[in-house]
């Protein structure tokens, strides 16, 4: 009887795990494990998680004014990501123009630059396995009106013009933005003592 209950719990757990992974990862490339390697129990090279991926997260002036920096940092720490760069700055206009160069032709562009230079910004670089896609999900939809509860934007904002936080939207974007916002010396390479507790390496 007990064994039967145990088996049912295990089955339900693995089903939920598959379902969650599928929902959360849709639309993003995922790490693949070859069928042969999986069948033999060996781990292929590609299944070793890349824990060195990095992304740029910035708490925008509205987030800083509203004292949300701590809560935003806490969400990333809690998730298990590693902070490798952090600074507070009044963002120069030329940096903002380069950062948002793809939005230059948008009607809201001048107001976006005004908003982003209206107060201090807290810029951070976070590191971890698939941190780019995970942080986009944690930050939520660009328009807070469409952002899910539980995301930063969904919990702390309601209008697209004041959406609290920036997160790089792709690996290439993250690399470009990190180089734009941080010098090499401002980024720290370090190993978390709990690394093997957050991921099988
Ligand atoms: P993202 O921040 O989710 O990556 P993007 O489309 O890259 O979204 O837009 C960059 C930023 O421009 C947004 O976070 C938001 O602050 C601002 N923005 C985007 N669309 C609008 C709009 O329609 N009105 C005002 N501001 C906007
Ligand atoms: Mg963007």
Image: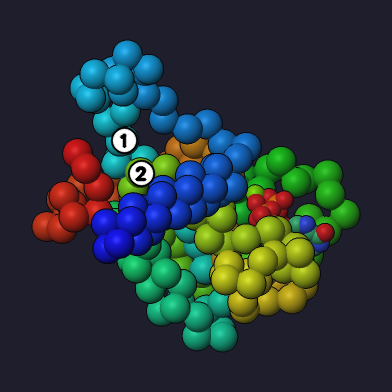
- Could you tell me residue 75's position as x and y percent? 42, 69
Horizontal arrangement in the rendering, residue 35 relative to residue 101 (left or right): left
The answer to whether mark 2 and mark 1 are in CB contact below 8 A is yes
Whether residue 93 is visible: no
- Could you tell me residue 72's position as x and y percent? 46, 72
Q: How is the image coloured?
A: rainbow
Whether residue 153 is visible: yes
Q: CA distance from mark 2 to mark 1?
A: 5 Å
- Could you tell me residue 180's position as x and y percent? 48, 45
Which residue reaches farthest front?
Answer: 1
**Where, quadrant-wise, is the N terminus in this rendering?**
bottom left
- Identify the residue position indicated by label 1 in the image: 50
Horizontal arrangement in the rendering, residue 86 relative to residue 110 (left or right): left
Depth order, front residue of 42/172: 42
**Which residue is pictured at 68% across the width and 43% down the height?**
101
Depth order, front residue of 135/179: 135
Above or below, comparing residue 126 to residue 75 in the picture? above
Horizontal arrangement in the rendering, residue 100 relative to residue 19 (left or right): right
- Could you tell me residue 3's position as x and y percent? 27, 57
What element does badge 1 sit on?
A: loop
- Identify the residue position indicated by label 2 in the image: 129
Q: Classify mark 2: residues with Cα within 10 Å, few (<14), some (14-19) or many (20+).
A: some
């Amino acid at each position: 009887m007990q064994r039967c209950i145990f088996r049912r719990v295990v089955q339900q757990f693995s089903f939920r795990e598959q379902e969650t992974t599928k929902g959360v990862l849709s639309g993003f490339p995922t790490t693949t494990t070859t069928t042969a390697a999986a069948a033999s129990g060996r781990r292929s090279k590609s299944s070793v998680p890349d824990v060195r991926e990095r992304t740029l997260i910035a708490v925008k002036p509205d987030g800083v004014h509203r004292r949300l920096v701590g809560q935003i940092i806490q969400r990333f720490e809690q998730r298990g990501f590693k902070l490798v760069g952090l600074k507070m700055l009044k963002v120069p206009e030329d940096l903002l123009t380069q950062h948002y160069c793809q939005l230059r032709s948008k009607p809201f562009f001048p107001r976006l630059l005004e908003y982003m230079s209206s107060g201090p910004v807290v810029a951070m670089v976070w590191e971890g396995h698939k941190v780019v896609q995970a942080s986009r999900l944690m930050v939520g939809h660009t328009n807070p009106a469409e952002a899910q509860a539980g995301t930063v934007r969904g919990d702390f904002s309601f209008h697209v013009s004041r959406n609290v936080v920036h997160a790089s939207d792709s690996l290439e974007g993250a690399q470009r933005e990190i180089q734009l916002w941080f010098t090499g010396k401002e980024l720290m390479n370090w190993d978390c003592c709990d690394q093997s507790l957050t991921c099988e390496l």
